[in-house]
Amino acid sequence: MDYSFFKLTLGAIATVGLYSVLYRENKVYRLFEHIFLGLAAGWSITALWTEVLKDVWWDKMVGRAAEGGDPAQPGYWLMAILPFIGLLGYFVFSQKHNWASRIPIGILLGLWAGQQFEAFTNRFTQQIADSLKPILPTTSGFLRPDTSAMTSAEAAEVATRVYGSQALSNIIFVVTLLSVLSYFLFSFDVKGRFLRNTTTMGRWLLMIGFGAIFGSTVMMRFSLLIDRMYFVFIEWLMQGLLGRT
């Protein structure tokens, strides 16, 4: 029995069944939706152990070295209490011992709140630093030369220069940044003509940015659709079904 063609057929039926929702919601779509959710739930349980619990918790607890790690790594057996703390969350279903479910929630909220200070610094401080771009060229060249054939020292020297095209891109970036930020100055009334025009330009630039994001999202959906249609019409119908006849 050709199991490869059997799997292709199941995949094609599931694909057509899921895309039948484009016509209207129907029982065929709901059937494959529930099958997908069941498979996703089973895969999530397996991935939870293989990609999270085993590497992050079990191997560290028993002292098992990760791939390429120190074989003499000691075990952190205090981590054995973590599953019991996590299981306390299921007491939310108990009316008598509901209070116990707040213990892991409080621990997670405390850890999350502490991590947000570091996350805020790493994310926004880096963004502020990256927004400080030079807008004046430091060399007479307009286009940045190709550094693939250069030595590391020559490439490093080229990286320190600001060419005309880079300065132009940086000017557009800085103007866009200041215009968009001026649009969100709601703490005072904008009366000046210059600032009013700047906020208007910021609103238009925001709309352009949102349009680009929406367009990329639509293209991503079309890429997924094209991949699925290629699977149905080429891999299954042309190569699989008609190729067997």
Image (cartoon, rainbow, N blue to C red):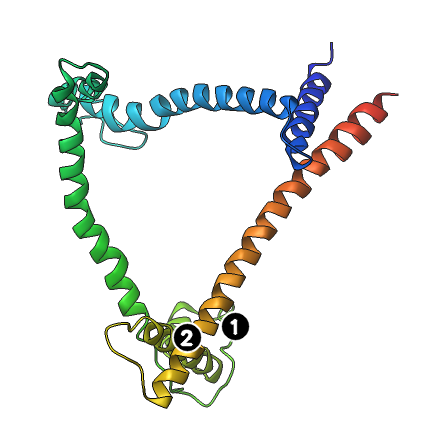
In the image, what residue type sits under mark 2? Gly
Q: Residue furthest top?
A: 1
Question: How far is mark 2 from mark 1, CA to CA?
Answer: 34 Å
- Mark toward the viewer: 2 or 1: 2
Name the one closer to the observer, 148 or 26: 26
Instruction: Name which quarter of the figure residue 22 lies in.
Output: top right
Classify residue 144 as left or right of residue 48: right
Residue 54's x, y, as percent? 30, 23
Q: Residues within 10 Å of mark 2 (few under 14, many from 20)?
A: many
Q: Where is residue 147 in the image (x, y as percent from the top left)?
A: 48, 70
Report the disc number at residue 228: none
Q: Quadrant of the C terminus?
A: top right
Q: In what element is the residue under mark 2?
A: helix
Left or right placement of residue 22 versus residue 64 in this view:
right
Left or right, residue 100 beside residue 32: left
Front residue of 44/33: it is 33
Q: Position of residue 86 (x, y in %)?
A: 20, 22
Q: Name the residue under label 2.
A: 202
Q: Is residue 232 above or below residue 218?
A: above
Residue 146 is tagged as 1
Residue 193 or 56: which is nearer the viewer?
Answer: 193
Q: Which of marks 2 and 1 is nearer the N terminus?
A: 1
Q: Which amino acid does label 1 sit on?
A: Asp
